[in-house]
């Protein structure tokens, strides 16, 4: 009976429209204007801070009219080890007072943004120019740059996309220096280092397997657990110092590693105990 139900369910899945298939590429040309440079449609396309005609203060005229096409997607991160997302371009240069149209293309089945911060707030609400697509597609937005030399951060603000590589820098005129951790452009603030991936102090926490065997062969495994807990408590101040300066995600990763080690250790102890009891009985 159950096997019949299973076979029917599998057949139904096989012939049904593919629920997880690729989304269709959408060209977002029909945007509704909500005023203040905010445009959007019902298919997940959005522009904030669109400015096609207002000259920023200090610009006598539009100095240049430029157009660029920017791709966003997982595949562009492949050349940057340790990243997951990227734009196809990480650095842009434009003259002050340039009118720029960006054709933003999302190559992924997930949401991406091309977001620029630090623009004058009298002209750009929240000092931001922002384009967004919730799936594969194309959207085009325009803005006019202010006259001063400045380096702007470009990023995707979807959770962890920037941290995982989706960012760049845009320089107006001479710019105002370089931003850190721009993939392929500037040095990472925290460089991934796989040469010694297990911190010393954490390594001390992992009780040597031979020692564990010695102790558990001796008497009670509970003693080992208490011993382990005591070590953990004693090491806490050291760990706090060790974690100083690390990002939250790095700390969580380290804690997970410790927990993983502790978990496998307790499993070992329990199996040891069970085999001890069963050998006593027999
Ligand atoms: Cu993104």
Image: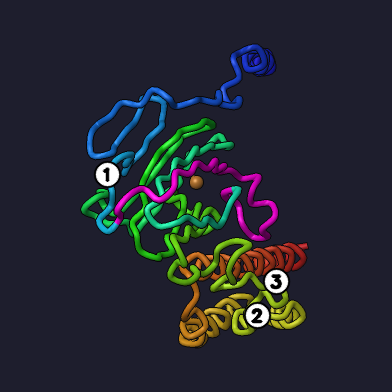
In percent of the image, x 64 and y 51: which residue is there? 77
Q: Which residue is mark 2?
A: 203
Q: Quadrant of the C terminus?
A: bottom right
Circles 1 and 3: CB atoms closer than 8 Å: no
Please give the range of residues in magenta. 59-87
In percent of the image, x 73 and y 83: which residue is there? 211
User: What whole-number distance in Å separates the C-alpha atoms at marks 3 and 2?
Assistant: 15 Å
Q: Secondary structure at mark 1?
A: loop
Ligand 1 within 8 angstroms of badge 1 C-beta: no
* Foreground of the two, 226 or 8: 8
**Tag on residue 241?**
none
Sort mark 3 into few (<14), some (14-19) or many (20+) by Cα contacts within 10 Å. Answer: few
Sort mark 1 into few (<14), some (14-19) or many (20+) by Cα contacts within 10 Å. Answer: few
Would residue 207 appear left or right of 166 to someone viewing this image?
right
Q: Quadrant of the N terminus?
A: top right
Mark in the foreground, 2 or 1:
1
60 falls in the magenta region: yes
Indicate the quadrant where residue 59 lies: bottom left
In percent of the image, x 32 and y 56: which residue is there? 119
**Tag on residue 194?**
3
**Tag on residue 54?**
1
């Amino acid at each position: 009976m159950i096997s019949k139900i299973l076979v029917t369910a599998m057949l139904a899945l096989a012939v049904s429209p593919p629920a997880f298939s690729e989304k269709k590429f959408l060209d977002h040309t029909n945007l509704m204007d909500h005023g203040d440079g905010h445009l959007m449609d019902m298919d997940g396309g959005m522009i904030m801070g669109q400015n096609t005609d207002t000259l920023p203060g200090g610009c006598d005229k539009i100095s240049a009219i430029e157009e660029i096409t920017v791709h966003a997607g997982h595949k562009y991160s492949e050349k940057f080890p340790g990243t997951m997302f990227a734009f196809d371009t990480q650095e842009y240069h434009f003259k002050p007072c340039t009118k720029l149209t960006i054709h933003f293309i999302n190559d992924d089945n997930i949401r991406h943004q091309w977001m620029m911060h630090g623009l004058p707030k009298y002209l750009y609400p929240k000092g931001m120019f922002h384009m967004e697509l919730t799936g594969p597609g194309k959207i085009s937005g325009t803005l006019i740059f202010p006259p001063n030399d400045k380096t702007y951060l470009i990023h995707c603000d979807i959770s962890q996309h920037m941290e995982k590589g989706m960012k760049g820098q845009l320089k107006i005129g001479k710019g105002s220096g370089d931003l850190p951790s721009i993939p392929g452009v500037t040095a990472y603030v925290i460089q991934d280092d796989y040469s010694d991936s297990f911190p010393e102090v954490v390594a001390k926490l992992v009780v040597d397997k031979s020692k564990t065997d010695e102790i558990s062969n001796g008497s009670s495994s509970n003693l080992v657990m208490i011993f382990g807990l005591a070590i953990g408590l004693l090491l806490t101040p050291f760990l706090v110092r060790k974690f100083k300066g690390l990002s939250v995600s790095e700390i969580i990763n380290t804690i997970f590693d410790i927990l993983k080690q502790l978990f496998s250790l307790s499993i070992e102890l329990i199996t040891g105990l069970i085999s001890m009891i069963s050998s006593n009985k027999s």
